[in-house]
Amino acid sequence: MDQLIARESTPTSSPATTSRLWLAGPIGLWAVVGTFVLLGVIRSVQVDVPFRDPHGAYWWSRVELTASIFVGCVLLEGIVRAGLPLSPARVWSVIREKWTVGRLVYSWGALLAYHATYLTYHNLKSWNDLRTPRDGMLLDWDRALFFGHSPAVLIHDLLGEHVAAWILFVWYETFPTLVVVAFPACVALAKRVKDAYVCIAAFVWVWMLGTGTYYLIPSLGPFHSAPQEFSGLPHMPIQDTQARYMGQWENLRADPHAHDAFAQVAAFASLHVGVAAVILGVVWWHRMRLATIAMTIFVAGTMVATVYLGWHFFVDDLAGLAIAALAWILGPPTVGVRRRPVRSS
């Protein structure tokens, strides 16, 4: 760890100052995550339902997947940095130079904080489905914004309900893969570990803020509250997923204490939009201009897809953008970082 601190410290920083700056990342991040987990424990006691991880979907399998992606990113970066002619010994030397034991411990401290947040988020999201949804209010807000019209119907009329449906379905379904790759990659590929902590802090904040909006306005989504608006769409896997989510919602409400009672449906705010916008923030933070343009397009398309397919109200997407912006306002100071890295020449 001392080698890692020395490597990333500035010439004018004293060892004591540098150590405090490096401790600020883990302490700040885990203080926030620990508070969120504590809130989860309190809510668990209130609803008398323990934390659950169905089939290891939100902890064990996710940690294993993160480890695999992390190793892949480290190996890929090592190959690129080693250059040609390709030599396993040279690649291994480059990897060892960057990935000291201290850096590995420091980096995985951030990744495990993310996973603790993610598990807590899903349990709090499930327990929120015990509350009465308020979709009618969100429907009214959408119609007020669009002068009495449904934004979903307007988009269907504009884009059609056949080819566009399948394109937007694929666009929407790209999100899970993007997320599971993005957060370990932002740690594995960061030149400065403190930038990895900034990005993970932003991810942590957006999941926590999203949970807060779920509890602020419990909701299910327009696919359930206004199904007639989506009856013209072709049958796609999306409708099967929506039906499965509603089945989980009904099972949870029928018997919250059943061992398999676990629901995952919520509309306000859209975390498809919120988390995608945080990933946009990651590439912006690292001054990756082309990737920033590409992610801006992806976020815009995701906003269209969530409304078109009935997952979210338009106001959900606006709230998703708002919490992503707030996550990036809160992320850097949470881990004691003030500035973005300087662009490499």
Image: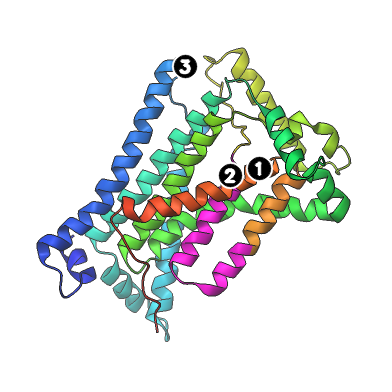
Q: Earlier in the sequence, mark 3 or mark 1?
A: 3
Q: Residue under circle 3? A: 47
Which mark's residue is nearer the viewer, 3 or 1? 1
Residue 88 versus residue 192: which sits nearer the camera?
A: 192
Q: Amino acid at mark 3?
A: Val
Residue 43 versus residue 333: which sits nearer the camera?
A: 333
Q: Is residue 139 above or below residue 46?
A: below
Q: CA distance from mark 3 to mark 1?
A: 29 Å
Q: Amino acid at mark 1?
A: Val
Main secondary structure type of the part rendered in magenta: helix
Q: Earlier in the sequence, mark 2 or mark 3?
A: 3
Q: Is residue 91 above or below residue 320?
A: below
Q: Are marks 3 and 1 in contact (CB under 8 Å)?
A: no
Image quarter (top left, top right, bottom left or bottom right) of the C terminus: bottom left
Q: Amino acid at mark 2?
A: Ala
Q: Residue under circle 2? A: 319
Which mark's residue is nearer the viewer, 2 or 3? 2
Residue 9 versus residue 92: which sits nearer the camera?
A: 9
- Residue 315 - label: 1
The location of residue 62, given as percent across then percent down, is: 47, 44
Q: Is residue 81 above or below residue 124?
A: below
* Residue plotted at (21% across, 71% down): 7
The location of residue 273, given as percent across then percent down, is: 60, 49
Q: Secondary structure at mark 1?
A: helix
Q: Secondary structure at mark 3?
A: helix
* Residue plotted at (55% across, 69% down): 291
Question: Which span of residues is magenta-colored?
Answer: 269-296
* Residue plotted at (39% across, 78% down): 81
The location of residue 113, given as percent across then percent down, is: 36, 44
For residue 326: magenta?
A: no
